[in-house]
Image (cartoon, rainbow, N blue to C red):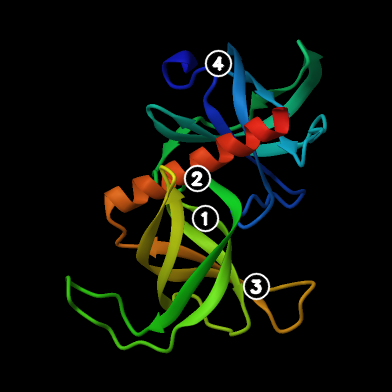
């Protein structure tokens, strides 16, 4: 049954579950690939690679796994039961410990990056084309990750959750820089542990046109593929 939903080669995202049961999306995550379907309760996943080094997933550690498939986005919780080396590849065997469920595509795979952005606060989201909300001055910042659903960046001003922003940035698509103007709201904000007076914002894109969203998703996957190829070579 499982092979009708996921298949070998599908991209996966791993989020470690803490002892307190926390698997918050703002935490550490790894990107990898599904390499083997063992049965309806077990799968083999390639050990993630960071900075050209294999990340050794520990036996009995628990993760939430997101599966990016042709049929949509799925998730479940799983525990590492085995790990071994096979044909020069490091593999972790996961056993599912929760239901396997489809989730909304708004939870997108994202990638760490450094993208210069301009942003300004707005009092509301525009209701139609040409509508211009009251806004503050433009400010510069650097995004530290991006997905089709949102981005994170650091800045020195503090705003509460649900604060609204207009954001502009450029990313390369098909070897050309493409300009984006998007609207977003803060869904999470925290102090930066190593930089006093700086805050880390996590934002969700609001009202993003499907074509824009898909092109951002394409950029993210192309960039992740490029990095993985670089790590392997």
Check if mark 1's residue and mark 2's residue have beta carbons within 8 Å.
yes
As drawn, the residue found furthest toward the front would be 175
Mark closer to the chain start, 4 or 3: 4
Res 40 label: 4
Q: Regarding mark 4 in the picture, which secondary structure is present there?
A: loop
Give the CA distance from mark 4 to mark 2.
30 Å
101 is higher (above) or lower (below) than 112: above
Residue 130 seen in the figure:
yes
Residue at 57% in and 33% down? 12
Residue at 44% in and 83% down? 138
Give the CA distance from mark 3 to mark 1.
17 Å
Give the CA distance from mark 4 to mark 1.
33 Å
Mark closer to the chain start, 2 or 3: 3
Q: Position of residue 44 (x, y in %)?
A: 66, 19
Check if mark 4's residue and mark 1's residue have beta carbons within 8 Å.
no
Res 190 label: 3
68 is higher (above) or lower (below) than 122: above
Q: Position of residue 161 (x, y in %)?
A: 50, 75
Q: Position of residue 212 (x, y in %)?
A: 32, 52
Residue designated by label 1: 146
Label 4 or label 1, whichever lies nearer to me, is: 1
């Amino acid at each position: 049954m499982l092979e009708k939903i996921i298949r070998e080669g599908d991209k996966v995202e791993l989020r470690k579950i803490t002892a307190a049961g926390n698997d918050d999306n703002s935490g550490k995550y790894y990107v990898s690939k599904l390499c083997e379907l063992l049965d309806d309760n077990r799968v083999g996943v390639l050990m993630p690679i960071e900075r050209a080094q294999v990340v050794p997933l520990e036996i009995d550690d628990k993760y939430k796994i997101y599966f990016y498939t042709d049929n949509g986005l799925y998730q479940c919780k799983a525990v590492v039961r085995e790990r071994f080396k096979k044909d020069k590849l490091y593999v972790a065997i996961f056993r599912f410990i929760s239901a396997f469920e489809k989730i909304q595509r708004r939870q997108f795979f994202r990638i760490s990056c450094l993208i210069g952005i301009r942003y300004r606060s707005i009092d509301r989201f525009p209701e139609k084309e040409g509508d211009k909300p009251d806004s503050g001055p433009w400010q510069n910042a650097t995004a530290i990750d991006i997905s089709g659903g949102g981005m994170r960046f650091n800045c020195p001003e503090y705003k509460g959750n649900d604060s609204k922003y207009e954001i502009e940035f450029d990313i390369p698509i098909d070897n050309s820089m493409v300009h984006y103007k998007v609207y977003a709201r803060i869904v999470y904000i925290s102090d930066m542990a190593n930089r006093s007076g700086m805050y880390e914002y996590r934002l969700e894109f609001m009202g993003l046109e499907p074509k824009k969203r898909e092109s951002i998703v394409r950029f993210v996957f192309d960039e992740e593929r490029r990095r993985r190829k670089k790590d392997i070579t």
